[in-house]
Image: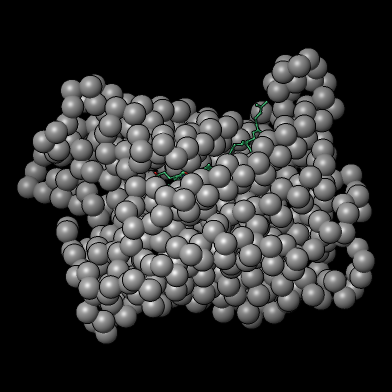
Amino acid sequence: MTTPTASDLEKRLTGAHLLVAHVALLGGILTGLLQALEHAGVQVPGPVDPLHAYYYQSVSMHGVLNVLVWTTFFICGFLPFLSARAYGIPLVSLRLGWLTFWVMLVGLVLAAIPLVGNAATVMFTFYAPLKAHWAFYIGLTLVVVGTWLVMLRLALTHRVWRAQHPGARTPLAAFMALVTFAMWTLASVGLAVEMLVLLIPWSLGLVAGTDPLLARTLFWFTGHPIVYFWLLPAYVSWYTLVPRQVGGKLFSDPMARASFLLFLILSTPLGLHHQVTDPGIHEGWKLFQAFLTFAVFFPSLLTFFNVVASLESGARARGGTGLVEWFGKLPWGDPSIAAQVLAMLMFCAGGIGGLINASYNMNLVVHNTSYVVGHFHATVGTAVTLSFMGISYWLVPHLAGRALWSRGLALVQSWLWFVGMLIFSTTLHELGLMGMPRRTMISQAAYLQPQWKALLPLVGVGGTLLFVSGVLYLLNLLLTLMVSGAPAPAVPDFAQAAASPEEAPMFLDRLRPWMVVAVVLIVIAYGPTLIHLVSTAALNAQGFRVW
Ligand code: HAS
Ligand code: CU
């Protein structure tokens, strides 16, 4: 027997994260199907109709499994894996890596028990005064602690690499992974405080009540930037791997770094755009944060420009011509590329919808309607999820040492997700504009409008296509692990996709000064509001269990 290499051992750790992520995704798509069918008005005959008997529990599980577990475990497996390859050295302390994994897994199990037992039917946003079992809050807190340990491991590795390469530019993929986790570590402070100071003592009965407005504000302090914690790993792939995969090169390395640094400073100080309708927060600060939301639009526009130019360089190298015709020359037969380019296309629509949400007065039209649900299925549900699927189509074969079971099936799956989401997300956007609320067992609502009823079957059709696509995806990966015989094909070149990373000016390869700017902006944007809310906090709201 040969002893496994450092890279083999790291692969196992990555594989463990991906396994948990995919189990969560299975739960996420199953519960998603139930909700889509409920909206479509389907009734299951028999004594217990699961679509209606478990609706709110199912929505809670769907949100937690998909946006908190699938994303986080995938990211904590993928980014460290990529960093090690980009640095060209093993990450420090495999033991710390496994410790992190187990902390996160224990946290997940702890949170999952009340969730499955209907003692945490509080949605993925767990707004007080909805009250869950303490194990739910402590479990999720442990998952967050795990992500901090990932940050620690990346930072320690960076130090080792830096000592060996003084003056050199950090490899782009490693730099981006570091910025992503640095941003998240700053951003997650709000959630940590909410858990440790408000929700955990409250759920344990140590304090009699809580303050819903303060809890919500701390939640959104983290709840907005968390969407970039999901998005940036997809961007890492779009910037550093996809250009190589399509046979081109990254258009601009410095512009890519600048975009990530803008995310570092701008992601957090704008969570109030989720609280435009909340009373008790001064309008001036909401408006200020609305402007900052428009500012964080900019690094995505940089990304759009840079990634399209990189795709174009690849397509032209493959014989593509014309102003837009080159788009057809991308390697559409490669499922990893098809999935990710379709994800990008969907993100164009999702991102523009985000601007509508962010527009102070228009938010009043769409807030708490199914428009928002349409928005986040185009963003986290497709830009991120379909990109992660595309990444899995090379990463899982690479980890397993076996070729993907079926490339054809993977292509069908990617298109099916795109088409399913086009139907699903567009319809929900439209229903939202007609005033249909989100997070509601709508088929049973006394106020169900005939014009909603006419469109709702499309939600069922889209949701069913997404479910089928998700099953095909998981099946393909399972068969890759179990029966695929062929050896894995070559993986994309990890190091750097840019022509030369040395082009980037040094100030774009530093983290500390930008962290300082980020903290200053957070203090300005949140300071007065938090001081006001803390000084007027009344811990007197009783917990509710509504379902
Ligand atoms: Fe959002 C609500 C505003 C991005 C997720 N968002 C949500 C919720 C979630 C979510 C989950 O201001 C609901 C939370 C809840 O439960 O209540 N969002 C924005 C804005 C952006 C944005 C301005 N959101 C995201 C991303 C998410 C996400 C990313 C997940 C990953 N969102 C809001 C607001 C709300 C909100 C309000 C609150 C609504 C309410 O009232 O409740 C922007 O960051 C978007 C910028 C993106 C773009 C797209 C650029 C396109 C690119 C693709 C390149 C394409 C290529 C291919 C290369 C401008 C980068 C094309 C090729 C060609 C040839 C064309
Ligand atoms: Cu947001």
Which image quarter is the N terminus in?
A: bottom right
Q: Is residue 490 visible?
A: no
* For residue 372, above or below residue 138: above
Q: Residue at x 41, y 28 (%)?
A: 426
Q: Residue 295: which quarter of the image?
A: top right
* For residue 537, above or below residue 479: below
Q: Can residue 516 be seen in this view?
A: yes
Q: Residue at x 69, y 40 (%)?
A: 303
State the count of labels: 0
Q: Nearer the viewer, residue 227 or 85?
A: 227
Q: Residue at x 58, y 54 (%)?
A: 267
Q: Where is residue 256 in the image (x, y as percent from the top left)?
A: 76, 47
Which image quarter is the C terminus in?
A: bottom left
Q: Position of residue 42 (x, y in %)?
A: 19, 34
Q: Nearer the viewer, residue 494 or 272?
A: 272
Q: Where is residue 236 in the image (x, y as percent from the top left)?
A: 69, 50
